[in-house]
């Protein structure tokens, strides 16, 4: 199967009126790639009345695959029979031709193509200089390209100006219209061309806050078109505050393999989840007061290919997240073991951050629970802590109960306001018995 170049598709629109008023004619065609021909195979059993008639007809059909005649997909390529759909992120290409239908030589021909969107007007002409002359039965051709970045109505405006042999300056302008109906049928109008841009993907995001300052982003991407897509790239461009790590591959000693396999296809209406871990940069992590309220995380960059390699690209707007509220004082763990022995002391490191806008004078109290017992002096002075400042404190404790135990019982008191902050269920640790009974 070979098709040379790009097929000039579908959606051919001749804007000449029934009574020709101008010496030049303007024609516009959308450039799209062809598609594989599909047929509907009809089969029956040998004992049925048609016998092997359907099988013989399918074998004689030149559009079927030899040896696999029952496949819907054929070997031939077909050109689109209408303008087709335009999806957000795809590149809209169009062929513009100005033909001299008269017997006169016209001069100083200027062809201009603009694309009007809901927010801007773009000049898509390859050249803004005029052609000196155009002889009879000759034409001026131009190919325009535009990456669709907006949803809504797009109007292609083509303007032609020229000078006749008598020195008369003439000018005409045409708007080309294309309307996508709910049943995907196509209607053309001689007055304008409206390109209704459709969304190819549905993107949903979720944020998860870890015990540390890390943020996990889950991006759910659904293919809402009627054809499969090859997902070439899905990446997250973080904002200046964060460093990002992609969690969509499994690393081995030899290479890194995608969790979605080697063939990264997304079928129609299928959804895929991508996961990213964002960690604040050191200069921002040290200032807890900076990461408050609504913060900008970054934006997703999605690149895909459809049938026969047509490429599309989407970039989301800046993703925002509401930072969790920690109150006046935040207590987090910098160091804690995963597993500890029963009734054996172990060390943890707590980080205390002043999230308020005032200076605090803090006192640390440690209260024992049923399973957790703190080692050390309770009620110790931590000193003054200025706004957005942090303090790391090493602590020692032990557990008297086996199993998964929650670390609780820390109390911070601000002596300035006589206000106490309680911290329970700070983290969990697995407590095991180091002694095993010998097998009999």
Image (tube, helix red, strand yellow):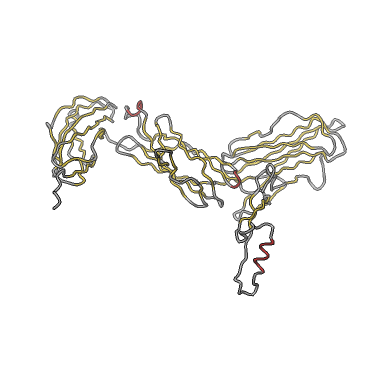
Spot occupied by residue 201 in the image (x, y as percentages of width and height): 51, 46
Vertical side of 407 occupied by 70: above or below: below
Of all residues shown, which one is farthest toward the front? 440
> Within the image, what quadrant is residue 162 found in?
top right
Q: Residue at x 69, y 60 (%)?
A: 61
Residue 192 visible from this viewpoint: no
Vertical side of 114 occupied by 361: above or below: above
> Within the image, what quadrant is residue 366 found in?
top left
Residue 62 horizontal side relative to residue 261, left or right? right
Of all residues shown, which one is farthest toward the left? 377
> Within the image, what quadrant is residue 356 found in?
top left
Spot occupied by residue 27 in the image (x, y as percentages of width and height): 75, 42
Residue 311 visible from this viewpoint: yes
- Count of all numbered marks drawn on residues in the image: 0
Vertical side of 356 occupied by 64: above or below: below
Q: Nearer the viewer, residue 368 or 416?
A: 368
Residue 163 horizontal side relative to residue 222, left or right? right
Residue 283 horizontal side relative to residue 166, left or right? left
Spot occupied by residue 437 in the image (x, y as percentages of width and height): 13, 49
């Amino acid at each position: 199967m070979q098709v040379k170049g790009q097929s000039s598709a579908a959606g051919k629109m001749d804007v000449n009126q029934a009574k020709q008023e101008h010496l030049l004619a303007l024609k516009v065609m959308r450039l799209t790639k062809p598609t594989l021909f599909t047929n509907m195979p009809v089969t029956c059993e040998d004992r049925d009345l048609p016998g092997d008639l359907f099988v013989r007809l399918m074998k004689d059909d030149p559009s079927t695959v030899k040896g696999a005649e029952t496949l819907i997909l054929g070997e031939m390529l077909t050109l689109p029979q209408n303008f087709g759909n335009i999806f957000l992120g795809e590149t809209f290409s169009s062929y513009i031709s100005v033909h001299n239908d008269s017997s006169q030589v016209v001069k100083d021909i200027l062809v201009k193509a603009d694309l009007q969107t809901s927010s801007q007007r773009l000049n898509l002409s390859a050249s803004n200089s005029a052609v000196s002359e155009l002889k009879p039965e000759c034409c001026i051709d131009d190919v325009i390209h535009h990456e669709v970045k907006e949803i809504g109505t797009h109007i292609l405006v083509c303007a032609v100006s020229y000078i006749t042999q008598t020195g008369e300056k003439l000018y005409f302008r045409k708007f080309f219209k294309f309307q996508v109906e709910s049943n995907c049928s196509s209607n053309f109008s001689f007055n304008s061309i409206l390109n209704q841009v459709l969304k190819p993907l549905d993107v949903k995001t979720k944020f998860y806050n870890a015990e540390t300052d890390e943020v996990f982003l889950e991006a759910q991407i659904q293919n809402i078109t009627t054809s499969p897509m090859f997902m070439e790239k899905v990446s997250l461009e973080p904002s200046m505050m964060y460093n990002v790590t992609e969690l969509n591959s499994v690393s081995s000693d030899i290479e890194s393999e995608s969790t979605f396999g080697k063939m990264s296809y997304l079928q129609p209406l299928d959804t895929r989840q991508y996961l990213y871990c964002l960690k604040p940069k050191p200069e921002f992590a040290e200032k807890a007061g900076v990461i408050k309220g609504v913060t900008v995380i970054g934006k997703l960059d999605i690149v895909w290919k459809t049938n026969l390699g047509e490429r599309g690209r989407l970039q989301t707007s800046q993703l925002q997240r509401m930072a969790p509220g920690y109150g006046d004082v935040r207590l987090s763990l910098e160091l804690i073991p995963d597993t500890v022995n029963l009734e054996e002391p172990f060390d943890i490191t707590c980080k205390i951050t002043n999230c308020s806008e005032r200076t605090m004078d803090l006192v640390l109290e440690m209260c024992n629970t049923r399973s957790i017992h703190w080692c050390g002096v309770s009620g110790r002075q931590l000193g003054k802590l200025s706004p957005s400042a942090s303090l790391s404190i090493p602590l020692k404790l032990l557990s008297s109960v086996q199993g998964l135990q929650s670390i609780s019982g820390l109390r911070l008191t601000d002596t300035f306001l006589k206000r106490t902050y309680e911290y329970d269920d700070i983290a969990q640790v697995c407590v095991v018995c180091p002694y095993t009974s010998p097998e009999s």
